[in-house]
Amino acid sequence: MPTWLYVLDILKKLDISEKEVLELINREPLELLSRIKDVLKDLGIKNVKHARVLNIFKNPLRVNEVLIEYIIRYRLGEASVKVMVSNNPKALLRMYYEYEA
């Protein structure tokens, strides 16, 4: 399954394998954020001062479909950063928002 980044209302495909994402989420979730820092910089998110994991959501209907949400503090304030492994990231986002509510 492909890996996606959702930040600042931008959905972008990432060049990270499903296997690597799942391993990092289970082992060291903040390392995954470090792994995509160049992509974040390209989107204007620079000088990250603090980051924390807000939530990890595993789709109960599809094996290995997962979303991890971070809250980061950077030079312009705070932002939500989501990394997803999914064939349908928009559907996974909808499911996540329903789960959150």
Image (spheres, rainbow, N blue to C red):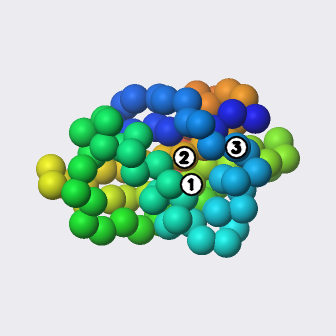
Locate the N terminus and report the quarter of the image it occupies.
Answer: top right
Task: Name the residue at 72% across, 62% down.
Answer: 23
Q: Earlier in the sequence, mark 2 or mark 1?
A: 1
Q: Earlier in the sequence, mark 1 or mark 3?
A: 3
Q: Position of residue 85 (x, y in %)?
A: 67, 42
User: Which residue is nearer to you in this view: 46 or 93?
Assistant: 46
Q: Position of residue 90 (x, y in %)?
A: 58, 28
Q: Position of residue 98 (x, y in %)?
A: 57, 43
- Which circle marks residue 17 in the picture? 3
Q: Residue furthest left?
A: 76
Given the image, on which type of amino acid does mark 3 rest?
Ser
SS class of the residue under badge 2? strand
Mark 2 touching mark 1, by CB under 8 A? Answer: yes
Name the residue tied to disc 1: 68
SS class of the residue under badge 3? loop
Q: CA distance from mark 1 to mark 3?
A: 15 Å
Reply above or below: 88 against 74.
Answer: above
Q: Residues within 10 Å of mark 1 (few under 14, many from 20)?
A: many
Q: CA distance from mark 2 to mark 3?
A: 12 Å
Given the image, on which type of amino acid does mark 2 rest?
Val
Residue 18 picture quarter: top right
Q: CA distance from mark 2 to mark 1?
A: 5 Å
Residue 26 picture quarter: bottom right
Q: Can you tell which of label 1 and label 3 is closer to the viewer?
A: 3
Task: Name the residue at 64% across, 62% down.
Answer: 25
Reply above or below: 71 against 64.
Answer: below
Task: Name the residue at 45% across, 59% down.
Answer: 34
Q: Residues within 10 Å of mark 2 (few under 14, many from 20)?
A: many
- Number of marks in the rendered image: 3
Q: Earlier in the sequence, mark 2 or mark 3?
A: 3
Q: Is residue 9 left or right of residue 65?
A: left
Name the residue tied to disc 2: 83
